[in-house]
Amino acid sequence: MSTIRNPVGPQPPQVYWRRRIMVGLGLVAIIVVIVLIIVRPGSGNEGTPAADVAASPSASADASAEDDEESTDDGMCRTENLTIEAITDSDAYAAGVNPQIGMRLTNVGTTPCILDVTPSRQVYEIGSGDETYWLSSDCQQEAAEAMVTLEPNEPQSTTLIPWDRTRSAPCDNSTQPVPAGDATYHLQVRLGEDLESARKTFRLL
Protein backbone atom coordinates (compact mmCIF):
# COMPACT_ATOMS: atom_id res chain seq x y z
CA MET A 1 0.00 0.00 0.00
CA SER A 2 1.36 3.42 -0.86
CA THR A 3 2.55 5.43 2.12
CA ILE A 4 2.30 8.74 0.14
CA ARG A 5 -1.42 8.50 -0.55
CA ASN A 6 -2.32 6.74 2.72
CA PRO A 7 0.10 7.66 5.55
CA VAL A 8 0.34 5.20 8.48
CA GLY A 9 2.17 5.19 11.76
CA PRO A 10 1.76 6.24 15.31
CA GLN A 11 0.98 9.86 14.24
CA PRO A 12 -2.32 10.94 12.73
CA PRO A 13 -2.21 11.10 8.93
CA GLN A 14 -2.61 14.93 9.00
CA VAL A 15 0.76 15.25 10.76
CA TYR A 16 2.54 13.36 8.00
CA TRP A 17 0.91 15.50 5.32
CA ARG A 18 1.96 18.73 7.06
CA ARG A 19 5.53 17.51 7.38
CA ARG A 20 5.70 16.53 3.72
CA ILE A 21 4.26 19.91 2.67
CA MET A 22 6.78 21.82 4.80
CA VAL A 23 9.68 19.74 3.45
CA GLY A 24 8.42 20.34 -0.12
CA LEU A 25 8.15 24.09 0.44
CA GLY A 26 11.65 24.15 1.89
CA LEU A 27 13.04 22.37 -1.17
CA VAL A 28 11.25 24.81 -3.47
CA ALA A 29 12.70 27.78 -1.56
CA ILE A 30 16.22 26.33 -1.79
CA ILE A 31 15.83 25.78 -5.56
CA VAL A 32 14.60 29.39 -6.06
CA VAL A 33 17.58 30.77 -4.10
CA ILE A 34 20.04 28.71 -6.17
CA VAL A 35 18.45 29.87 -9.44
CA LEU A 36 18.60 33.53 -8.36
CA ILE A 37 22.28 33.18 -7.43
CA ILE A 38 23.13 31.67 -10.82
CA VAL A 39 21.02 33.96 -13.00
CA ARG A 40 21.56 37.26 -11.10
CA PRO A 41 18.82 39.29 -12.83
CA GLY A 42 20.05 42.67 -14.18
CA SER A 43 23.75 41.74 -14.03
CA GLY A 44 23.97 41.55 -17.84
CA ASN A 45 23.66 45.37 -18.18
CA GLU A 46 26.27 46.33 -15.57
CA GLY A 47 28.51 49.16 -16.80
CA THR A 48 26.45 49.75 -19.99
CA PRO A 49 23.79 52.46 -19.72
CA ALA A 50 20.59 51.52 -21.51
CA ALA A 51 20.67 54.77 -23.48
CA ASP A 52 24.09 53.92 -24.95
CA VAL A 53 22.99 50.47 -26.04
CA ALA A 54 19.95 51.88 -27.78
CA ALA A 55 21.89 54.74 -29.37
CA SER A 56 24.74 52.70 -30.86
CA PRO A 57 22.75 51.01 -33.68
CA SER A 58 21.06 54.33 -34.46
CA ALA A 59 24.39 56.16 -34.69
CA SER A 60 25.75 53.50 -37.05
CA ALA A 61 22.65 53.76 -39.21
CA ASP A 62 22.96 57.54 -39.36
CA ALA A 63 26.63 57.29 -40.41
CA SER A 64 25.80 54.76 -43.12
CA ALA A 65 22.97 56.95 -44.40
CA GLU A 66 25.32 59.95 -44.58
CA ASP A 67 27.89 57.98 -46.60
CA ASP A 68 25.19 56.74 -48.97
CA GLU A 69 24.06 60.29 -49.66
CA GLU A 70 27.48 61.43 -50.90
CA SER A 71 27.06 59.77 -54.29
CA THR A 72 24.22 58.40 -56.37
CA ASP A 73 23.48 54.69 -56.74
CA ASP A 74 25.87 54.51 -59.72
CA GLY A 75 28.67 56.33 -57.85
CA MET A 76 28.22 59.69 -59.57
CA CYS A 77 29.02 62.86 -57.62
CA ARG A 78 26.19 64.85 -56.10
CA THR A 79 26.19 68.56 -56.90
CA GLU A 80 26.01 69.53 -53.23
CA ASN A 81 29.33 67.73 -52.63
CA LEU A 82 31.20 69.61 -55.36
CA THR A 83 32.85 73.01 -55.68
CA ILE A 84 33.91 74.64 -58.94
CA GLU A 85 36.36 77.50 -59.52
CA ALA A 86 37.21 79.53 -62.60
CA ILE A 87 40.98 79.63 -63.10
CA THR A 88 43.42 81.53 -65.35
CA ASP A 89 47.16 81.17 -65.71
CA SER A 90 47.71 84.82 -64.77
CA ASP A 91 45.93 87.87 -63.39
CA ALA A 92 47.19 90.23 -66.12
CA TYR A 93 48.28 89.74 -69.74
CA ALA A 94 50.58 91.91 -71.82
CA ALA A 95 49.64 92.80 -75.37
CA GLY A 96 49.76 89.78 -77.65
CA VAL A 97 49.59 87.24 -74.79
CA ASN A 98 46.48 85.02 -74.80
CA PRO A 99 44.88 84.09 -71.46
CA GLN A 100 44.73 80.40 -70.61
CA ILE A 101 41.43 79.51 -68.94
CA GLY A 102 40.01 76.47 -67.18
CA MET A 103 38.07 75.18 -64.20
CA ARG A 104 39.02 73.48 -60.93
CA LEU A 105 36.72 70.89 -59.36
CA THR A 106 36.81 69.59 -55.80
CA ASN A 107 34.91 66.77 -54.10
CA VAL A 108 34.19 68.12 -50.61
CA GLY A 109 32.57 64.88 -49.48
CA THR A 110 34.30 62.04 -47.65
CA THR A 111 34.09 59.30 -50.29
CA PRO A 112 35.30 59.17 -53.94
CA CYS A 113 32.74 59.85 -56.66
CA ILE A 114 32.60 59.92 -60.46
CA LEU A 115 32.05 63.15 -62.40
CA ASP A 116 31.07 63.67 -66.02
CA VAL A 117 33.44 66.28 -67.48
CA THR A 118 32.59 65.75 -71.14
CA PRO A 119 33.76 68.91 -72.98
CA SER A 120 30.24 69.71 -74.20
CA ARG A 121 29.20 70.11 -70.55
CA GLN A 122 32.01 72.59 -69.86
CA VAL A 123 30.98 76.19 -70.55
CA TYR A 124 33.40 79.16 -70.33
CA GLU A 125 32.11 82.72 -70.43
CA ILE A 126 34.27 85.84 -70.64
CA GLY A 127 32.78 89.28 -70.20
CA SER A 128 33.32 92.76 -68.89
CA GLY A 129 30.73 94.59 -66.85
CA ASP A 130 27.33 93.34 -67.98
CA GLU A 131 28.49 92.43 -71.49
CA THR A 132 29.45 88.94 -72.60
CA TYR A 133 32.31 88.94 -75.12
CA TRP A 134 33.10 85.28 -75.55
CA LEU A 135 31.15 82.06 -74.86
CA SER A 136 32.67 78.63 -75.45
CA SER A 137 29.28 77.09 -76.27
CA ASP A 138 28.63 79.45 -79.20
CA CYS A 139 29.91 76.89 -81.66
CA GLN A 140 30.98 73.94 -79.54
CA GLN A 141 31.59 70.66 -81.31
CA GLU A 142 30.57 67.26 -80.00
CA ALA A 143 33.26 65.41 -78.06
CA ALA A 144 33.70 61.97 -76.57
CA GLU A 145 32.30 61.34 -73.12
CA ALA A 146 34.83 61.87 -70.33
CA MET A 147 34.54 60.63 -66.75
CA VAL A 148 36.90 61.31 -63.86
CA THR A 149 37.03 60.01 -60.31
CA LEU A 150 37.31 62.76 -57.72
CA GLU A 151 38.99 61.76 -54.47
CA PRO A 152 37.83 63.65 -51.35
CA ASN A 153 39.42 67.10 -50.99
CA GLU A 154 41.84 66.59 -53.91
CA PRO A 155 41.15 69.39 -56.46
CA GLN A 156 41.43 68.49 -60.14
CA SER A 157 41.77 71.06 -62.93
CA THR A 158 40.77 70.78 -66.56
CA THR A 159 43.38 71.30 -69.26
CA LEU A 160 43.75 75.04 -69.81
CA ILE A 161 42.52 76.34 -73.15
CA PRO A 162 43.62 79.60 -74.83
CA TRP A 163 41.32 82.54 -75.46
CA ASP A 164 42.42 84.53 -78.51
CA ARG A 165 41.06 87.82 -77.16
CA THR A 166 38.30 87.99 -79.77
CA ARG A 167 34.50 88.09 -79.58
CA SER A 168 32.50 84.94 -80.22
CA ALA A 169 29.25 84.34 -82.02
CA PRO A 170 27.31 81.16 -82.80
CA CYS A 171 29.42 79.38 -85.43
CA ASP A 172 30.86 82.68 -86.71
CA ASN A 173 34.51 82.66 -87.74
CA SER A 174 34.95 86.39 -87.29
CA THR A 175 37.94 87.48 -85.24
CA GLN A 176 36.88 90.86 -83.90
CA PRO A 177 39.29 91.76 -81.10
CA VAL A 178 38.01 92.86 -77.72
CA PRO A 179 39.14 96.10 -76.05
CA ALA A 180 42.47 95.98 -74.24
CA GLY A 181 44.68 98.68 -72.75
CA ASP A 182 44.31 97.68 -69.09
CA ALA A 183 40.71 96.51 -69.51
CA THR A 184 39.22 94.32 -66.77
CA TYR A 185 37.47 91.08 -67.71
CA HIS A 186 35.91 88.24 -65.78
CA LEU A 187 35.76 84.51 -66.40
CA GLN A 188 32.84 82.39 -65.24
CA VAL A 189 32.64 78.63 -65.79
CA ARG A 190 29.82 76.12 -65.60
CA LEU A 191 29.65 72.32 -65.65
CA GLY A 192 26.28 70.92 -66.65
CA GLU A 193 23.15 72.76 -65.63
CA ASP A 194 23.61 73.13 -61.88
CA LEU A 195 27.29 73.71 -61.12
CA GLU A 196 28.45 77.30 -61.66
CA SER A 197 31.49 79.15 -60.39
CA ALA A 198 32.05 82.57 -58.96
CA ARG A 199 33.76 85.03 -61.32
CA LYS A 200 37.53 85.20 -61.68
CA THR A 201 38.81 88.66 -62.68
CA PHE A 202 41.83 89.36 -64.91
CA ARG A 203 43.19 92.24 -67.00
CA LEU A 204 44.26 92.73 -70.61
CA LEU A 205 47.09 95.27 -70.69
Image: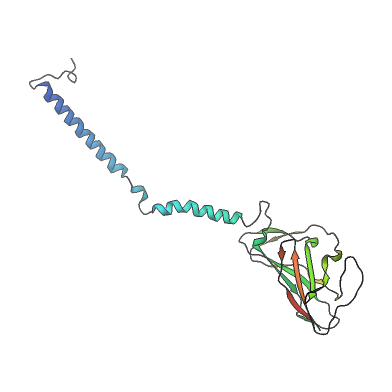
Q: How many marks?
A: 0
Residue at horizontal 88 percent and vertical 68 percent from the top: 169
Q: In screen coordinates, is 153 left or right of 45? A: right
Q: In screen coordinates, is 34 left or right of 186? A: left
Residue at horizontal 64 percent and vertical 62 percent from the top: 81
* Image quarter of the C terminus: bottom right
Residue 127 location, quadrant: bottom right
Residue 131 location (% of width, % of height)? 80, 74
When the figure is inspected, residue 42 is found, relative to residue 86, above or below; the finding is above
Residue 177 location (% of width, % of height)? 88, 77
When the figure is inspected, residue 90 is found, relative to residue 143, above or below; the finding is below
Q: How is the image coloured?
A: rainbow
Residue at horizontal 21 percent and vertical 33 percent from the top: 27
Q: In screen coordinates, is 48 left or right of 201? A: left
Residue 67 location, quadrant: bottom right
Q: In screen coordinates, is 49 left or right of 33? A: right
- Residue furthest to the top in view is 1
Residue 179 location (% of width, % of height)? 85, 80
- Residue furthest to the front in view is 130
Residue at horizontal 49 percent and vertical 52 percent from the top: 58
* Image quarter of the N terminus: top left
Residue 145 location (% of width, % of height)? 79, 57
